[in-house]
Image (spheres, rainbow, N blue to C red):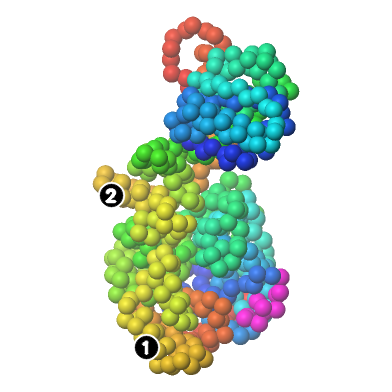
Amino acid sequence: MIVAERKPLGEIKSFVENYKKLLIVGCGTCATVCLAGGEAEVKVVASGLRIGFLREDKEVEILEDCVTRQCEPEFVEPLVDRISNNGVEAVLSLGCGVGVNFLADRLGSTPVFPGVNTEFFGAAVEPGVWVEMCAGCGNCILHLTGGICPIARCSKSILNGPCGGSQDGKCEISPDVDCGWNLIVERMKKMGTLERLGELIPPRDWSTSRHGGPRRVIHEELVSGSQGDEEAAG
Amino acid sequence: METALLKSGSNLERVIQDGHFAVTVEIGPPMDCNEEIVLEKARLLKGLADAFNITDNQTGVVRLSSIASAALIIGEGLEPVMQMTCRDRNRLAIQADILGAAALGIRNCLCIAGDHQSFGAAGRLKGHPGAKNVYDIDSIQLVAALKGMRDDGVQQGGDPLDKKPPIFIGAAWTPLGDPIEIRPLRLKKKVDAGADFIQTQGVFDIDRFRDQMKIIVDMGLHERTAILAGIIVPKNLGMLKYMNSSVAGVSVPDDMVKRMEQARAAAGDDKKKARENQAEEGIKITVELIEQVREIPGISGVHIQAIEWEHRVPEILKRAGLVPRPGQPKGGE
């Protein structure tokens, strides 16, 4: 999932302190699961802001909402209606960056501010700990590396690792960071495929990643609205 | 090594091909544009080694560039090994710099990943920990790209080069890095990619290094590349301990640490004497290490790193019997 962390309340307040009517909107999917911007966090942020504004004798009306997903029209369109029908001056989204963008594209002149920092695609390795596991680089090579991603989990994203900075299973940048290539080596040892690491992985084509510009995925059969066979999209 | 035509015509290549025990010495450029510092180090070391590595923003700190420093020392009559990290440049910049280096007469290039930018000289300097790193290609892919440019006359993207850059291609190897079982395989990968010579991470634990080299010799890699053992000159006890605890792939045997402790203790409260004793012990250790690695089968030379201590290198090389060096090539380029 997409892992995010709530911004400090002071920073959030600095974004919205000049508006009289705010809507704080959470997201019921990733941001909820990683405890950054779900219904509970909307309440916490709203209370924090109310207390802050009260101390400064500022009258700010704060509305609260939380939608299932901030990245799909069916959940966001009703939100857009609520914003325009209720005289909301500014929106604070506790969804990931996708949610903020998706709202910004639809809100005309109403500002939308980010209440969280969107961090990465990761998994909860233990309660309260999320770790990055995918970089969304658009051309998966996990079949070459035992299912462990060198792009996301090596600090240098090198394809023919490990570099010389691996020590006791940790990365040279910090004893708190696992060396991704050490994980790959250990995994491939267990699988009996270590020798495969002797094959040179050539320079990759980063155009499938962010470096090729903003990306899109298109399922033609859905775009054209055709009701034909449900073949896998090419 | 094959006794064929020289690939680059570099002095280092010639020395290796002629079967001499090769010596390279590292020169660290300054953190400003004072070319005199590079030139002074060059004058001090001239003629004492076969080639001189110029580091490339070593430990993630901005320094006078390796390509410019390399050109400066050529002007003093020294042969550089330009170090090239993958951290700071994408494949366009790397290849442009290699072509530029070749045009400036640089004939050796060491291809390395580079310390992560968060290093900032291990916290001693501010550095630029917030920098965006590149790592478009990794060090092994860089070796292959360089070989493609030199031998096949093609850029990594496939466009042709009319004039090929005659570069002797180097790569680094951390023989005792974790996970240790992958290290021989990774060296093989570098050799397969086209590394003509290898400079290793600093070696202190001779026994463990000998064990790794046995594997390398069994794989026959020493016949396909020239392996120069890395020798880091320990200035004092603090440095030795720091390297043991904090530098990946470096382990210092306990008895070596004890020797340094004794050297310091022998000076009592006299701080100046303690410094001198440790320096002398450090040089003794260095000379012994050089002699020991020289006896290890598969080792073709040494790569000496005296970090900000280059002025002690002449003494070390003399005491190790490594000077004078084999004759310089006539005519250069």
Q: Does residue B214 appear to the left or right of A32 in the view shown? A: left
Relative to residue B164, is residue A114 depicted above or below? above
- From the top left corner, tell me how far across and down residue B239 is, in percent: 46, 76
- From the top left corner, tell me how far across and down residue B133 is, in percent: 57, 52
Where is the C terminus of chain B found, in terms of image quarters? bottom right
Task: Check the residue under mark 2 and report the chain it is in.
Answer: A
- From the top left corner, tell me how far across and down residue B215 is, in percent: 29, 65
Task: Check the residue under mark 1 and report the chain it is in.
Answer: B
Location of mark 2 (residue): A189
Residue depicted at x 44% and y 72%: B242
Q: Which amino acid type is marked by label 2?
A: Lys
Q: Which amino acid type is marked by label 1?
A: Gln
Q: Is residue B210 magenta?
A: no
Cα–Cα span, label 1 and label 2: 43 Å
Relative to residue A68, is residue A174 depicted above or below? below
Q: How many marks?
A: 2
Relative to residue B11, is residue A50 depicted above or below? above
- From the top left corner, tell me how far across and down residue B195 is, in percent: 46, 62
What is the span of residues highlighted in magenta in the rendered image? B33-42
Location of mark 1 (residue): B262
Relative to residue B302, is residue A226 depicted above or below? above
- As drawn, the label of residue B1 is none
- Secondary-structure class at tag 2: helix
Q: Main secondary structure of the magenta part?
A: helix
